[in-house]
Amino acid sequence: MDLGNSSSMKHLATALFLILIISLPAGAADVQATVDRTQTTVNEPVILSVTVKGGAGDVDISPIKDFRVMSRGTSTSLRVVNGTMSRQAVYTYALFPFRSGRLNIPALDVTNGDGNAFRTRQISIQVTDQPAHAEASRDVFVKAFVSEAEPYQGQQLTYTFRVYAAVSFQSARFQQPDFKGFSSKEVEERKKFTTVISGREYNVVELVFVLVPLKTGELTIGPATLELDLVRRTNRRRSSTFDSIFDDPFFSRGRLEQRSFQTRALPVRVKPLPDYDLGNVAFSGLVGAFSLTAELEAASVRVGDSTTLTVTVEGSGNIMDASYPDVTIPSAFKVYQDTPEEAVTVGPEGFSGKKIFRSALVAVKGGRFTLGPVEMSYFDTSTGGYRIMSADSLPLVAEAVGGDGASEDIQVFSAPADQPGLPQFKKNKVEFTGRDILPVKEELDALETRGSLSPLTFIIILMAAPVCFFAIRVVGYLTRKSTDPGHLMAERSAQSLKLANHAGVADSDFLGHIYLALISAILSLNGTHGESLTCVEARQILSERGVPESIIESASVLLAKIESSKYGGGRLNADDRSALFEETRQLIGELGR
Amino acid sequence: MRILHSIALFILVTGWVGTAAGDEPARLFLNGIQAYNEGDYEAAIDTFTRLADSGVKNGKLYYNLGNTFLKSGDIGPAVLWYERAQRLIPDDPDLNFNLTYARSLIEDDPEKQGAPILRILFFWKYILSAATIQWIAVSLNFMFWGLMAVRLFHPRFSPPSVRYATLGLTIIFSLTAFFNYYEMKYVREAVVLHEKASVRSGLTPDSTELFVLHAGTKVRVDKENSGFFRIRFTDDKIGWIAKAELGVI
């Protein structure tokens, strides 16, 4: 190659540069934070996107203090360009400004999958207050308000959230505010209506929550948020009469634009109830507007019979908290209270309905009596004061059983319902009249730790039993073997052979040992004890045990030889002694096989 | 004589120290009872918690902690300690009464329990503590192998029907004990401690709130990650919740 050629040098440099670019690692990370706008209003979120090139990462959003942050999810993409693979993850957040002014999204730390740390740059956002006249210029906006900004404790109020939309939308996702300090209940029926604002028609969806303040003081209902997809139609064709038919994103290929909205936080000042000043009637705890009626099923009953007193409390407010009203009942009647019946509904105006209290009055004494009056006090939110609602006194006559006008007392007992001749009473389910827990345990054994066994200990203890069992078996087996005659005879045979082999043993003793060794070996096959055997007996035993005839013959001959030497009285030379011992040892070995 | 005197003194001193050390938890416990009875629930909580933290694992102590938290109006920790007690003394009537009452105060509808048929079929698992089941399994096991040993020497005293019945019960209780171990290790349950706890879609405090649980509600813990538990309330309600919001049973 001619290195002096400048054109060739340029081509070489270009090629090397390209190779260098292509050989860069595919996972090289790059982090970038972008926003969809740098100017917004307090009700409109800014969409923050953090792009991590080279793979997934961990974005630390904790430094963001000027905005309420809601995650909008993560998208990842993988691209292959000219054989080079690149990955990218985009983390999206909706940032709702806490206030107006110039707010900052600070630099965010991002850690990628390899543990490398990166930092985005700081972004400034100009946030302005929402101008009052701006609503009409917007396609969609939200509003929230409460029915009563300064309620009394226990007074119900409503929280209304409305979304106004002049364009179509779908996939609405509503997140209700934090009703801390209130009990809340959403009105199930959502209202939809149409309204015109500054000449523009809006479809309105209304959600209502009934709230009851649980404590007094300055409370705040947090912002509610709504995310939805606006349908933006693409202008691909001219308007026609079929537009209305196909005015649907399914047909119109409309583009979807994700938007988020947030209402303002609403302050509520909850006032305490004033001091109770109606000392003659106890405060019932009801707050709202109520009325009360009372009626008797029958104004005249016979002694022993019953009539029903029905007291109905009706109105709006915390009607469900109403308890049995105090009614003065003459002692001539036994009173049996029934479980109250509730018919309470929740609507846009709050809780309303009635609660009915029924009592069975059983006359136990004749005479003319007056029930009541029935009185109940409540706090009237419209006047801001306590009121007493009451029902007139009710006359009630109890007629004596004899019918002659004379008083006749009777006793009321609990009795089986099917007992004839006695009044029938409705049996009531036993209800708790008060709720509390049972007392603490005072025994000092509460200080003893009673944990369960560890798995290993449990297994070891479980295994201990079978191990003991098999140990018993082994011991038993060994013990049984030592008492077995066959085993004992075999042992004696081996022992006698061993004694016979000792040097310096006298001939008579030698012959006695090998004799005993031989007959013990034969007896061990039979499994019996014995001290001597004749040749015939030995033959019989060996034959019964299936020993080959050649061995039987050898044993018979050897036994006869030992006996003749033993009882012959002759002396054995060393060779004879050795040959006799060897012959006996071999035979015993063959018998043992 | 002097040696004997020294030994006696040593025994007296070490014995006294040992007794004093042993009396300390008892004294604390009695102080806790007294504080509870006098309505000083903060002091009672402090005392019983110290005993539990010192390593005492006892259903009665846990029950007392449940009572004390409930009396102080803290429903979340109350249910947590009752649930812990129930694992140790599931058949205690006082505990079951109080736990039922505490559950009635929980704002959320309870999670669906296991299939009732399983609770009927495997009733012993639900009415006996894990320790009791273990010791029953061990006792039955010894009984079975004892019968096997007796059979070796006196077969008449070890009839097959008794051996088979004992073996069957041994297997049932041993398997139950092993299942309890599995449950303790892999099936974690927890109770919401705070008044309200947001269950979110992700591992950051700003992730979308999926649903809200209230104090005392029991959930299953699937996994944990970066200071969060992934919990399962029902089959269709799962999400991430900060660890500090829960107490693991």
Image: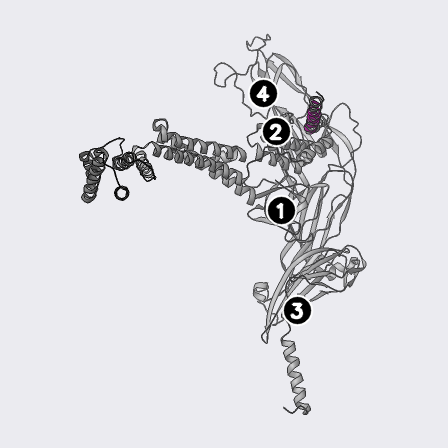
First in sequence, mark 4 or 3: give its number.
3
Evaluate whether residue A415 shows in this view: yes
Evaluate whether residue A541 shows in this view: no
Asked if the residues shown at circle 1 and circle 4 are in contact, with their CB atoms under 8 angstroms apart, the answer is no
User: Which chain does the residue under circle 2 lie in?
Assistant: A
Q: What residue type is disc 2 on?
A: Pro
Asked if the residues shown at circle 1 and circle 3 are in contact, with their CB atoms under 8 angstroms apart, the answer is no
Quadrant occupied by the C terminus of chain A: top left
First in sequence, mark 3 or 2: give its number.
3
Q: Do labels 1 and 3 share a chain?
A: yes
User: Which chain does the residue under circle 3 lie in?
Assistant: A
Q: What residue type is disc 3 on?
A: Ala
Where does the magenta region start and end?
B8-24
Q: Which disc, if any, is residue A340? A: 2
Q: Do labels 1 and 4 share a chain?
A: yes
Magenta span: chief secondary structure: helix
Q: What residue type is disc 4 on?
A: Thr
Q: Nearer the viewer, residue B156 or A437?
A: B156
Q: Which of A102 and A415 is in front in this view?
A: A102
**For residue A30, side relative to residue B170 (left or right):** right
